[in-house]
Amino acid sequence: MKKIVAIAFASVAMLSTAFAGEIEGVVKTFDAAANTVELETGEVYTIAQGVAVEGIEAGKTVMIMFTDGTTDATEIAIVE
C-alpha cells in the first residue's frame, strides 16, 4: 500500500511540472502599465500579478517561466 501511495505522489509531482514552460530571451520592450514584456523574438508575455519585475528593461536577458499553452508569465528573472 505504501508503494502505491508513493507512486501516486510521484506521478502528481511530475504532472504539475509538465504544465510549466520556460524561455530565455532578450527584452525588446517592457510595459509596466500593461504588465507585459516583449522579447526580441516577438513573443509577448503577460506578467501575473505579484511577480517581481525590478530591473526588467529593454536589452536585458531574462528567463521567463510561464503556464504551458498560454503567455501568462508566472516568474521572470534577469539572467546575469
Image (tube, rainbow, N blue to C red):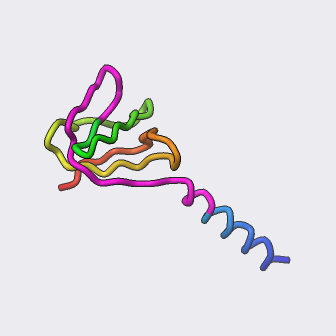
Residue 70 vertical placement versus 13 (above, below): above
Q: Is residue 55 visible?
A: no
Q: Position of residue 73 (x, y in %)?
A: 42, 41
Q: Position of residue 2 (x, y in %)?
A: 80, 77
Residue 54, percent from left and from top: 24, 36
Magenta span dominant secondary structure:
strand
Left or right position of 41 against 75: left
Q: Quadrant of residue 75?
A: top left
Instruction: Give the residue at x 44% y 30%.
Output: 49
Question: What residue lies at 33% left-to-right and 41% top-to-bottom?
Answer: 43
Residue lying at the far top of the rendered structure: 33
Viewer-nearest residue: 61 or 51: 61
Which residue is the extreme one toward the right? 1
Q: Would residue 72 be visible to someone looking at this image?
A: yes
Q: Residue at x 22, y 54 (%)?
A: 79
Asked if 14 appears above or below 38 in the picture, the reply is below
Left or right position of 9 against 48: right
Figure quadrant of the C terminus: bottom left
| Quadrant of the image containing the N terminus | bottom right
Q: How many marks?
A: 0
First to last magenta residue range = 15-37
| Residue at image coords 34%, 37% | 44
Q: Nearer the viewer, residue 65 or 9?
A: 65
